[in-house]
Amino acid sequence: MMPRLTSLALAATLLLGAAGAYAAAPGSSWTAAQQENRQQVNRGRISSAEAATIVRQRFGGEVMNVSTRQEGNITVYRVKILQSSGHMRTVSVNAETGAIMN
């Protein structure tokens, strides 16, 4: 009986320890982009992925890159797309509202 209790206690300790380690570092397995997106959502901004989706829906093509810039007091996503015509296009998206700026 004692070995079975010891095994159960050990299993419970390992499970709780693993859960505690994950809870202590919730973003440890996230990519830098996912962490940035989460921080921006918490500040009331759209994420870079949402900006890419807005541009893709409006202009089509393939999103090649998304960068963040500060223009005065406005945070702007610059979404670079490759259009079906073969031309590259850069579209600015207001990070607060999701509005296309150009």
Image (cartoon, rainbow, N blue to C red):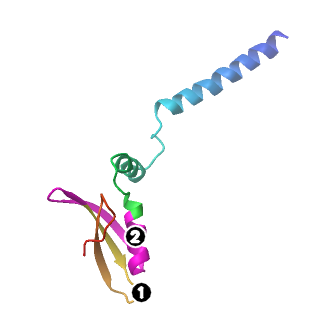
Please tell me which residue lies in front, 35 or 4. 35
Q: Is residue 60 magenta?
A: yes
Give the residue type that dot 2 points to. Ile
Residue drawn at x 41%, y 62% is 50
Q: Which quadrant of the structure image shows residue 99? A: bottom left
Q: In which quarter of the image is the C terminus?
A: bottom left
The residue at which mark 2 appears reads as 54
Please rate how many residues cluster around mark 2, counting C-alpha atoms within 10 Å: few if below 14, some from 14 to 19, many from 20: some
When the figure is inspected, residue 57 is found, relative to residue 96, above or below; the finding is below
Q: Pointer 1: what residue?
A: 84
Give me the residue at 16% from left, 56% from top: 73
Q: In which quarter of the image is residue 27?
A: top left
- Left or right: residue 22 versus residue 44 is right
Residue 57 location (% of width, % of height): 43, 75
Task: Locate residue 65 relative to residue 10 in the image: left or right.
Answer: left
Q: Which of marks 1 and 2 is nearer the N terminus?
A: 2
Q: Indicate the secondary structure of the residue bearing disc 1.
A: loop
Secondary structure under badge 2? helix
Residue 15 x, y percent position in the rendering: 65, 27
**Residue drawn at point x = 38 percent, y = 83 percent:** 83
